[in-house]
Amino acid sequence: MQVEELKRYLKGKHMDVEKWPLHYPDPCPQQGSGDDCGIFTCKYIECLARRDIQDLPFSQDDMPNVRAKLALHCINAYFNAQDRS
């Protein structure tokens, strides 16, 4: 989803999105396929959460590994939740 689309979606939802600063990492990893946008987004969010945004340390070549780690994380979270219930 592009930033402008997100702003239109959030308009009227009690958020002043016009004041949100936009920062574009340089260089910013670019996806090379049409089906990795979700994985790129998850990896970018992970980097933001870890405050590891200097020279974002991933590329299209990393996506199979990133996808596998994300799947493993979700599977582990599912089974950990089952153990607690």
Image (cartoon, rainbow, N blue to C red):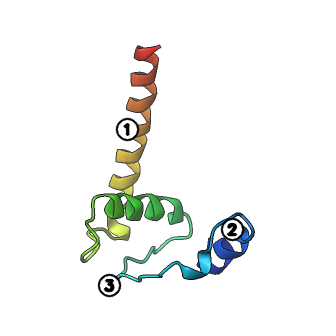
Residue for badge 1: 72
Q: Secondary structure at mark 2?
A: helix
Q: Which class describes the residues within 10 Å of circle 3: few (<14), some (14-19), or many (20+)?
A: few
> Residue sitting at 37 percent across and 39 percent down?
73
Q: Please, is residue 20 above or below residue 9 in the view?
A: below
Occupied quadrant, residue 63: bottom left
> Residue sitting at 60 percent across and 75 percent down?
17
Q: Secondary structure at mark 1?
A: helix
Q: Amino acid at mark 1?
A: Leu
Q: Earlier in the sequence, mark 2 or mark 3?
A: 2
Residue for badge 2: 10
Q: How far from the left and from the top, in percent, is residue 12?
A: 75, 68
Would you say 50 lies left or right of 24 here?
A: left
Q: What is the C-alpha distance between the residues marked 2 and 3?
A: 28 Å
Q: Earlier in the sequence, mark 1 or mark 3?
A: 3
Occupied quadrant, residue 60: bottom left
Foreground label between 1 and 3: 3
**Which is more toward the observer, 31 or 49?**
49
Q: What is the C-alpha distance between the residues marked 1 and 3?
A: 29 Å
Residue for badge 3: 27
Q: Earlier in the sequence, mark 1 or mark 2?
A: 2
Q: Which class describes the residues within 10 Å of circle 2: few (<14), some (14-19), or many (20+)?
A: few
Q: Secondary structure at mark 3?
A: loop
> Residue sitting at 44 percent across and 64 percent down?
40
**Which is more toward the observer, 40 or 68?**
40
Q: Amino acid at mark 2?
A: Leu
Q: Please, is residue 8 above or below residue 14 in the view?
A: below
Q: What is the C-alpha distance between the residues marked 1 and 2?
A: 32 Å
Which quadrant: the N terminus? bottom right
